[in-house]
Image (cartoon, grey):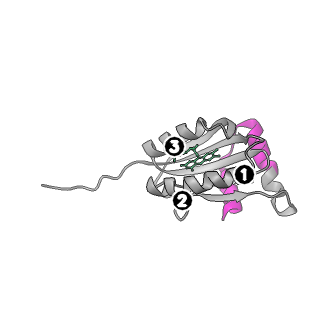
Amino acid sequence: MVTQDIVKDEIQLIYVSERCASTDDAAINKIKLRAEPNNHRRNITGALLYTEHYFLQYLEGEAAVVDALYASICRDPRHTNVRLLLRKSITQRDFSRWSLGIKKLLDNSENQDFIAVLNMIGQASKVSESQLEWFKLALK
Ligand SMILES: Cc1cc2nc3c(=O)[nH]c(=O)nc-3n(C[C@H](O)[C@H](O)[C@H](O)COP(=O)(O)O)c2cc1C
């Protein structure tokens, strides 16, 4: 019998959403504590960037697994107005080292540009490839 490695299609999915007022830092820490082992188990990697008002999350992994997680994230009452920004096939991951990197963009001079652009994306539901590339700098 011939055994063959089956390479499953991988995707990167990015969405933006609005943080509910009740979703404070403690609530986000609770999401992290659950999401990290979940993502590890599902071979999902990614990063979650957030400000006072918005979440921006990168998810990477096998297409069906990422789509299923995204569907469950869309139903999560801790945020609203979840909008898909990008879903593309990938051959290489950007966040291969992280089950879920989380970064809060504090409102300080260092982050002002990132916050301004994330506010713009949150309002317009649109992002450019160059903005996404640039956001990775905030995460690395
Ligand atoms: C902004 C945000 C990001 C989230 N990210 C993840 C994630 O990366 N992985 C995950 O398993 N759950 C994540 N969640 C939680 C999911 O919506 C859902 O509650 C969880 O997957 C259910 O996990 P369970 O099957 O262990 O109950 C996130 C929730 C929010 C509000």
Q: Position of residue 82 (x, y in %)?
A: 65, 37
Please report the residue visible at 74 percent of the width from the left and 53 percent of the height from the top.
25
| Amino acid type assigned to the residue bearing label 2 in the image | Ser
For label 3, count other residues whose C-alpha is less than 10 Å away and answer few (under 14), some (14-19) or many (20+). Answer: some
Q: Earlier in the sequence, mark 3 or mark 2?
A: 3
Cα–Cα gap, marks 3 and 1 = 19 Å
Q: Is mark 3 within 8 Å of ligand 1?
A: yes
Q: Nearer the viewer, residue 59 or 85?
A: 59
Q: Nearer the viewer, residue 75 or 132?
A: 75
Among the 4 quarters of the image, the one containing residue 140:
bottom right
Dot 1: element: strand
Q: Is mark 1 within 8 Å of ligand 1?
A: yes
Instruction: Answer with left or right where residue 103 lies relative to residue 12.
Output: right
Q: Position of residue 41 (x, y in %)?
A: 44, 56
Cα–Cα gap, marks 1 and 2 = 17 Å
Which residue is label 1 attached to? 50
Which residue is label 3 attached to? 69
Which residue is label 2 attached to? 99
Instruction: Answer with left or right where residue 39 lies relative to residue 32.
Output: left
* Residue extent of the magenta highlight: 116-140
Please report the residue visible at 59 percent of the width from the left and 37 percent of the height from the top.
74
Q: Earlier in the sequence, mark 1 or mark 2?
A: 1
Please report the residue visible at 48 percent of the width from the left and 40 percent of the height from the top.
68
| Amino acid type assigned to the residue bearing label 1 in the image | Tyr
